Amino acid sequence: QVQLVESGGGLVQPGGSLRLSCAASGSIFSINAMGWYRQAPGKERDLVAAITSGSSTNYADSVKGRFTISRDNAKNTVYLQMNSLKPEDTAVYYCHALIKYGISWYMVGDYWGQGTQVTVSS
């Protein structure tokens, strides 16, 4: 009964910016971590950025210095601010969350958003 809803994708020119958002809703006891992955046609889905419940962050080398991940715990929402976008950033971006959905220790699951298309082109 947990759902992740993404928004903010679109078409931008090289050097432009976009902000993606992902809101989690449903039976949420706590969120251990949230992150963003991306997948280009014919390629594997790769981690872009992640943020833990303690607000520590990790970034792929290819986006470090250009992308910023943040989290609003009150809204169960994670954001990805993408600046200085390059054509190679073009992909479907997926939100991911590791969510505890009940009080017991084993009530933990992985959840994925539906994906949002980001296209960087002139």
Image (cartoon, helix red, strand yellow):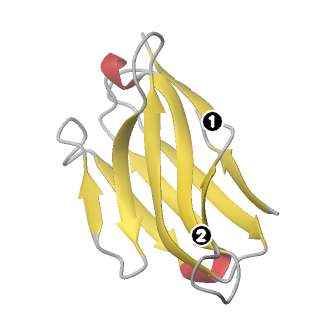
| Quarter of the image where one finds residue 57 | bottom left
> Where does label 1 land, which residue?
115
| Quarter of the image where one finds residue 24 | bottom right
Give the vertical position of 7 relative to 107 (above or below): above
Q: Position of residue 76 (x, y in %)?
A: 63, 73
Residue type pointed to by label 2: Ile
Q: Residue furthest front?
A: 106
Camera-nearest label, 2 or 1 = 2
- Camera-side residue: 73 or 46? 46
> Where does label 2 land, which residue?
99
Left or right, 100 with respect to 14, comes to right
Decide which of tag 2 and tag 1 comes sooner along the chain.
2
Q: Position of residue 105 (x, y in %)?
A: 57, 84
Q: Is residue 12 visible?
A: no
**Residue at image x 59%, y 53%?**
21
Mark 2 surroundings within 10 Å by alpha-carbon count, few (fewer than 14), some (14 through 19), many (20 or more): many
Q: Kindly indicate whether the residue at mark 1 contacts the one at mark 2 (C-beta within 8 angstroms).
A: no
**Residue at image x 38%, y 66%?**
51
Q: Can you say which quadrant of the picture contains the C terminus?
A: top left
**Residue at image x 29%, y 73%?**
56
Q: Position of residue 12 (x, y in %)?
A: 49, 24
Left or right, 105 with respect to 3, comes to left
Secondary structure of the residue carrying numbered label 2: strand
- Disc number placed over residue 91 in the picture, else none: none
Secondary structure of the residue carrying numbered label 1: loop
